[in-house]
Image (cartoon, rainbow, N blue to C red):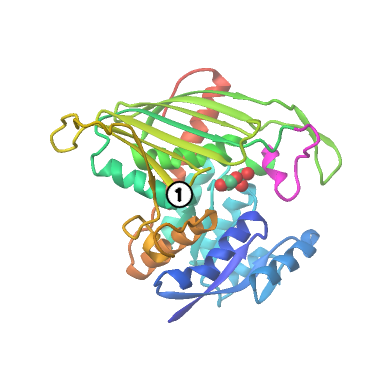
Amino acid sequence: MKTLNVGMLGCGFMGRTHSNAYNQVGHFFDIPFKPVLKVCYGREEDRAALDKFQKAWGYEETCTDWRKIVERDDIDIIDVVAPNFLHKEMVLAVAEAGKMLVCEKPLAMSFAEAEEMVKAVEKAGIANMVSFNYRRVPAVSLFKQVVDEGRVGRPFHYRAVYNQDYTISQKVPAGGAALWRLNAKVAGSGVTGDLLAHSIDTAEWINGPIKRVCAYTEIFIKERKNIETGEMIPITIDDACMFLAVFANGSIGTFESSRYARGRKNYSMMELNGENGALCFNLEEPEYLQFFRYADPDTGKKIEDHLTGWQKILVTNGEHPYMSKYWVPGTTIGYEHTFINQLADFLTSVGNKTVYQPNVRDAMRVQKVCDAVIQSAKEERWIDI
Ligand code: SOE
């Protein structure tokens, strides 16, 4: 089997999820490559974290100059998991080097950046994937399957919520390992690019393109200490964002996201209400899909029985998406498997020479919606996409 030498550009939280996926994917899926964790990148200032990362995941080497990794002849695939402001430069270099690309979401800091990246990647013709991992939660894949089977019928309402609560305290600094997400110069935007990007990606995948948006954003804590410089810096990213959406299929949507939703750690919910049925998923119970069956999809007639009501489907059977690859029915899988599933699909598509989705073009589309949301909040008006 051909080996696939991996260069990992970053050694933080997402570096861990992606490294674990390379280590695990061959245990569960028949993929046409054997991934080898060759080299990981981190800044010289983060040397201790980089060394720890190397040992934990089994990389052969470390390197503090990411360009050297991209230029190495023995590296087949580059995985970009560095903070958002570095994505563009890294992806352009990967395209130039003609290597396969995996990039963590959001693809870019803005739609303009994303356009430039897509142009370079498509010109180079390299296989590419953007990590919108929640599409590959088995219950979310089943959500999409049930919609595509016509069981929900004409869609009326789509709603998505993605809430966390880790930035409520004024003491939480901006900058450093995970908290660069609070610094606009590093992250681009706040919850819109970090959390709603996921919700927008799944919404458009399931319910088709969004046509118009109208948004409101809030910054609750206006100044935080930059952990790297010790200075107080103004916070300009959106701490919370709510927007209304009109979909091209005529349905209407609401989206809400915050990092100040006390009690919510990584609560991502999506619901679709249609004429014949409804579906609901919530990431706090990731093994379940809820389905309300109202009418027969073939006849459109109300199903007349006394069992009408929400069904809570335990998505762990062999006939459910991805589940035949894991354990036995009734045993659950978790967060890390979403990264394994997407990597398996990506490597399979590379082997079959088919186009993987979501790729950089799909991620550019998400970026377009995110930019429209931010613009709408700023200009206090509806924006057409
Ligand atoms: C932010 O806290 C974060 O790590 C996001 O960046 C991820 O994309 C999300 O899946 C979990 O939360």
Q: Amino acid at mark 1?
A: Glu
The residue positioned 44% from the left and 36% from the top of the image is 270
Q: Is residue 39 left or right of residue 329?
A: right
Identified at 77% across, 38% down, the residue is 172
Q: Which residues are magenta?
A: 169-184
Question: Which residue: 47% across, 38% down?
Answer: 199
Task: Tell me if residue 358 can be seen.
Answer: no
Where's residue 114, x and y in %?
50, 45
Count of marks overlaid on the render: 1
Q: According to the image, label 1 marks what residue? A: 287
Q: Which residue sits at x=52%, y=69%?
A: 24
Q: Residue 133: image x %, image y %? A: 48, 52
> Which image quarter is the N terminus in?
bottom left
Main SS of residues in magenta: loop
- Please check the rendered image and state whether residue 143 is part of the magenta-colored stretch, yes or no: no
Please identify the residue farthest to the front as the structure is shown: 306
Outermost residue toward the top? 380
Q: Tell me: is circle 1 under 8 Å from ligand 1.
A: no
- Asked if residue 58 shows in the view, the reply is yes
Q: Nearer the viewer, residue 364 or 97?
A: 364
Q: Secondary structure at mark 1?
A: loop
Q: Residue furthest left?
A: 299
Q: Position of residue 253 (x, y in %)?
A: 41, 27
- Identify whether 192 is placed above or below 45: above
Q: Is residue 317 above or below residue 1?
A: above
